[in-house]
Amino acid sequence: MENRETIIIKTPISNAEVVLKSWITGREKREINNVLFKDVEFEGQSYRIGGEKLAQLKDKTIEIVVVSINGVTENVLDILLDMRSEDYDYVLSKVDEITSDRASEELKKK
């Protein structure tokens, strides 16, 4: 396993310990974008994304960023999906912070 900084968070309802990568690589970002743009048709400068595509995008992002949940490293997506929705939403918000371009912008300011 690679040596990368991680972040440990606790979910608000079940108090589960979730370990997240603190940043993603260019290769990982490309994997996420591949899910987003696979089979997408562009019309000028716009495109449409269906609900199923959005779910696939979130799933791939979770699989890339979440290292473990309560020490378990396998099937983290399924574990997270089976958690209470408040815990799922909390973890997803942290995952989104890590993968957003805003995270990179914040690091540049430091």
Image (cartoon, rainbow, N blue to C red):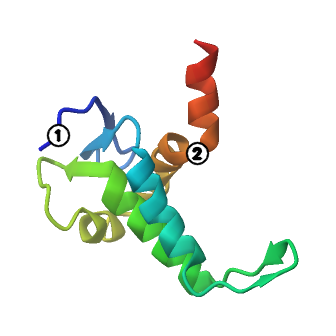
Numbered disc in front, either 2 or 1: 1
Task: Say which residue appears at 64% left-offset and 29% top-offset.
Answer: 105
Three-letter code, disc 2 = Ser
> In this rendering, would 53 be left or right of 88?
right
Three-letter code, disc 1 = Glu
Q: Could you tell me residue 11's position as x and y percent?
A: 35, 45
Mark 2 and mark 1 lie on one chain; the one further toward the N terminus is: 1
Which quadrant of the figure has residue 28?
Answer: bottom left
* Residue 85 seen in this snapshot: no
SS category of the residue bearing label 2: loop
Depth order, front residue of 44/80: 44
Residue picked out by circle 1: 2
Task: Say which residue appears at 44% left-offset and 47% top-offset.
Answer: 26
Depth order, front residue of 38/60: 38
Question: Dot 2: few (<14), some (14–19), or many (≥20) neighbours within 10 Å?
Answer: some
SS category of the residue bearing label 1: loop
Task: Say which residue appears at 11% left-offset and 44% top-offset.
Answer: 1
Q: Could you tell me residue 22's position as x and y percent?
A: 37, 34
Task: Say which residue appears at 32% left-offset and 63% top-offset.
Answer: 80
Which quadrant of the figure has residue 21?
Answer: top left
Which quarter of the figure is the C terminus placed in? Answer: top right
**Which mark is drawn over residue 100?**
2
